[in-house]
Image: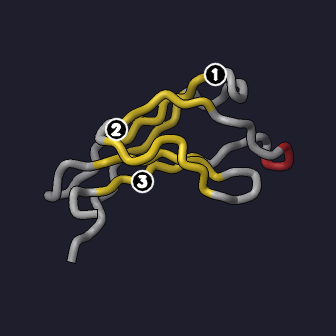
Amino acid sequence: VNGAPLPGNFMVTPKEGIELKDRFTFAASDWQDIDLPFTYQFSYVSSSSNLMVLRSKSESSYGSILLPAGLENNGYEVVCIAEIFDSLA
């Protein structure tokens, strides 16, 4: 049975910015698995709670991405997600 890669790091920088103007860097690092290469997919959770893919699976572990603002009642925060897949996924 193929297991998921062991957790590493996922960072989004900068921590704050202007919606659809400032670019945010998504970066995943230090994930581990014997079934290389990895592919990386970056997403965010929309205001209607849908998962919105920003960049489909790619071997690049980072990307520069524009984001919308989150909901006002959530402090405009946007939940960002990195999914890391091994070569058997």
**Residue 54 occupies which quadrant of the picture?**
top right
Q: What element carries label 1?
A: loop
60 is higher (above) or lower (below) than 7: above
- Identify which residue is drawn at 22% across, 63% down: 88
Structural crowding at the residue carrying mark 3, measured as other residues with C-alpha within 10 Å and reported as few (<14), some (14–19) or many (≥20): some
- Residue under label 1, please give it: 22
Question: Which colour scheme appears in the figure?
Answer: secondary structure
The percent position of residue 39, horizontal first and vertical second, equals 31, 48
Q: Where does label 3 land, which residue?
A: 83
For the residues marked 3 and 1, what is the alpha-carbon distance in whole angstroms? 23 Å
Give the amino acid at mark 3: Glu
Labels 1 and 2: the sequence-earlier one: 1
Q: Does residue 60 appear left or right of residue 65 in this picture?
A: left
| Three-letter residue code for mark 2 | Ser
Q: First in sequence: mark 2 or mark 3?
A: 2
Examine the image and state in which quarter residue 76 appears.
top right
